[in-house]
Image (cartoon, grey):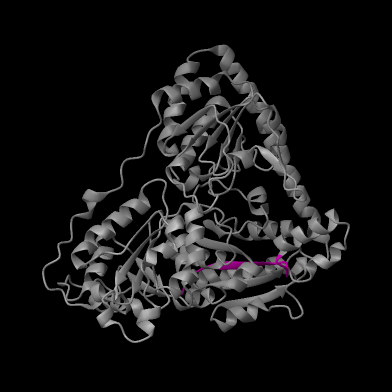
């Protein structure tokens, strides 16, 4: 992608120029949008007044793509990107992606336009049906804050407040809407752009000292402690801090996967095989766990009832800021789980302090240190045997006629293992984490919090955009049904020459729904083979290679034989590295 050159600072002539000045003040790199008339003023100001440089336009074919692209960018870059959406209808299109970002606690600055609030200036019909009172109502239940500045003088404070709110923990998207008059009227008096460095988010919040002391003592005295980590990895610096705490007390760690919170190469990682540890745990430390109840229970797919895996006497500590961001519209706050030591704090500062307190309590107690060493050896052995078992299972499927999900992850891991890779989307049903070496917290961005189909491809492109020119290889293990929702996102990847290795996990089904159909049929003693009706993507099958080529992305496949998989992946990798362009390999893989 060719970067535009910085332009000389100008005096704003129109209101939308001030909006662009605010984006420049915060060093916003990109603004993704599907062009719409209600923000035509901002569009013009970006490309003409702003010189299409910070922000630079990223042209998308759908508002859901624009917001999801900004979602992936923010997770990869650690700072917000702007998405701009048309009023009413555009915001409705964008609402699914905004909800995903809300559930995922990701900061995005969503901007919008509206027809003139002054009814005398509205064009007949179109301006009336595209003007809401007020537009923020449409997404207010799943943004952290929304605003519609009254006049041009209010624009700087509104944007600054929105940016600050979005980037203050717990982070989440915000929405700011601009009247057509504010955008398009001339600037009549000077608008001051403040020094935005003086409006930074507050310093991260530390836990209550007494609660932290209590938590430390419980962990040190525990015979079978366990850590469950979830959104902790949103701050990469928190990961080595968690490693230090886990090593100090030899505490096994379950990484829930919403972010990269703990290395799978570490001997204390027990993700994927911890039922026995949950059963015997006497103290559980939850770190930014979105669903604490779900982390300690098992649910029946047929009856929907949950039951605890943990023992009744387990003590629970939870460090999070979940209670700081709750809406009643959606039940994303989950079951109200009893907690013995609840601590509201930013885990990035609370975990190092907890480690310090634990080290202080242990002191020179030789008996405690011996018990810790013994526990470490036991967990390490469990970790190594589990990983060896997974590798054996994956390799055992190499002789199958069809490509298994495990073998897809295995072969892709072998092809990219010498690269500086980042898995920006997908895990091949968890096999990528089981088989690959995840050692750096930036190697995996986590799942989509809202589980909305259509997120993956667009978010992967946004993450790859964030890493343009870094030399890192961005990899997307792309679900077929997910891409069918937003397939035109491939054009954006081609248009802006975004290097991205896209590996289709094509099971030719909306398989999650098919699984539920199978469960219901079993429960009702009905034909399970009919679960494929209305879920299978076949007859005709989609040629994703041709779809990709139609949008300007190199495509290959479908790959159906195990012997053909690695050579196809190697060809695609070579293309991405040498051409610095996106490439897609369509792999027909078994659902499991």
Q: Is residue 51 left or right of residue 241?
A: left
Q: Is residue 33 left or right of residue 368?
A: left
Q: Total of numbered circles in the picture?
A: 0
Where in the figure is residue 398, as x and y percent of width and height? Answer: 79, 59
Where in the figure is residue 310, as x and y percent of width and height? Answer: 68, 31
The residue drawn where x is 72% and y is 56% is 406
- Residue 50 in sight in this render: no
Q: Is residue 69 left or right of residue 393?
A: left
Name the image quarter holding the N terminus.
Answer: bottom left
Where in the figure is residue 87, as x and y percent of width and height? Answer: 39, 73
Q: Which residue is more in the foreground, 383 or 231?
A: 231
* Residue 503 shown in magenta: yes
Q: Which residue is more in the foreground, 342 or 268?
A: 342
Q: Which residue is more in the foreground, 124 or 203?
A: 124
Rendered view: 121 above or below 411: below
The residue drawn where x is 23% and y is 51% is 197
**Outermost residue, left direction?**
189
The range drawn in magenta is: 497-510
Q: Is residue 471 left or right of residue 152?
A: right
Residue 298, quarter of picture: top right
Rendered view: 110 above or below 124: above
Name the image quarter holding the C terminus.
Answer: bottom right
Q: Which residue is more in the foreground, 309 or 355?
A: 309
Rendered view: 385 above or below 325: above
Where in the figure is residue 530, as x and y percent of width and height? Answer: 83, 67
Rendered view: 253 above or below 184: above
* Residue 344 shown in magenta: no
- Residue 106 in sight in this render: yes
Residue 112, quarter of picture: bottom left
């Amino acid at each position: 992608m060719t970067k535009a050159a910085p332009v000389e600072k100008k005096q704003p002539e129109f209101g939308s120029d001030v909006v662009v000045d605010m984006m420049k003040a915060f060093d916003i790199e990109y603004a993704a949008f599907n062009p719409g008339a209600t923000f035509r003023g901002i569009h013009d100001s970006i490309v003409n007044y702003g010189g299409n440089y910070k922000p630079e336009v990223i042209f998308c074919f759908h508002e859901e793509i624009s917001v999801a692209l900004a979602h992936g960018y923010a997770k990869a870059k650690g700072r917000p990107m702007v998405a701009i959406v048309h009023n009413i209808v555009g915001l409705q299109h964008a609402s699914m992606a905004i909800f995903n970002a809300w559930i995922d606690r990701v900061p995005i600055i969503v901007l919008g336009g509206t027809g003139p609030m002054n009814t005398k200036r509205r064009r007949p019909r179109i301006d009336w049906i595209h003007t809401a009172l007020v537009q923020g109502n449409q997404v207010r239940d799943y943004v952290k804050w929304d605003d519609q500045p009254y006049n041009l003088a209010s624009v700087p404070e509104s944007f600054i407040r929105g940016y600050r709110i979005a980037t203050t923990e717990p982070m989440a998207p915000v929405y700011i809407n601009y009247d057509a008059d504010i955008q398009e009227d001339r600037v009549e008096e000077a608008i001051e752009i403040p020094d935005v460095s003086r409006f930074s988010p507050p310093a991260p919040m530390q836990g209550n000292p007494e609660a932290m002391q209590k938590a430390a003592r419980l962990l040190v005295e525990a015979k079978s402690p366990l850590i469950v980590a979830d959104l902790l990895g949103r701050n990469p610096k928190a990961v080595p801090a968690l490693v230090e705490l886990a090593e100090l007390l030899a505490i096994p760690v379950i990484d829930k996967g919403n972010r990269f919170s703990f290395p799978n190469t570490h001997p204390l990682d027990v993700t994927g095989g911890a039922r026995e540890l949950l059963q015997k745990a006497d103290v559980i430390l939850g770190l930014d766990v979105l669903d604490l109840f779900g982390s300690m229970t098992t649910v029946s797919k047929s009856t929907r009832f949950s039951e605890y895996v943990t023992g009744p006497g387990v003590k629970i500590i939870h460090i999070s800021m979940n209670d700081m961001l709750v809406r009643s519209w959606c039940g994303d706050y989950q079951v109200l789980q009893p907690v013995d030591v609840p601590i509201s704090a930013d885990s990035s500062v609370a975990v190092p302090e907890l480690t310090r307190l634990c080290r202080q309590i242990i002191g020179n107690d030789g008996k405690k240190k011996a018990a810790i060493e013994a526990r470490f050896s036991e967990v390490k052995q469990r970790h190594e045997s589990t990983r060896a078992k997974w590798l054996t299972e994956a390799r055992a499927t190499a002789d199958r006629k069809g490509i298994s999900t495990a073998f897809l992850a295995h072969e892709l891991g072998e092809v990219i293992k010498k690269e500086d890779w980042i898995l920006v989307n997908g895990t091949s049903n968890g096999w990528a984490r089981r088989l690959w070496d995840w050692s750096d917290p930036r190697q995996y961005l986590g799942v989509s919090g809202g589980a909305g189909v259509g997120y993956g491809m667009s978010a992967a492109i946004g993450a790859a955009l964030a890493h343009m020119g870094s030399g890192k290889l961005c990899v997307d293990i792309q679900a077929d049904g997910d891409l069918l929702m937003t397939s035109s996102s491939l054009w954006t990847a081609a248009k802006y020459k975004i290097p991205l290795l896209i590996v289709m996990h094509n099971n030719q089904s909306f398989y999650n729904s098919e699984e539920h159909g199978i469960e219901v049929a079993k429960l009702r003693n009905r034909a399970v083979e009919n679960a494929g009706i209305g879920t299978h993507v076949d007859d005709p099958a989609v040629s994703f290679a041709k779809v990709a080529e139609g949008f300007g992305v190199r495509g290959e496949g479908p790959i159906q034989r195990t012997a053909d998989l690695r050579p196809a992946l190697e060809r695609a990798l070579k293309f991405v590295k040498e051409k610095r362009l996106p490439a897609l390999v369509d792999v027909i893989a078994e659902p499991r």
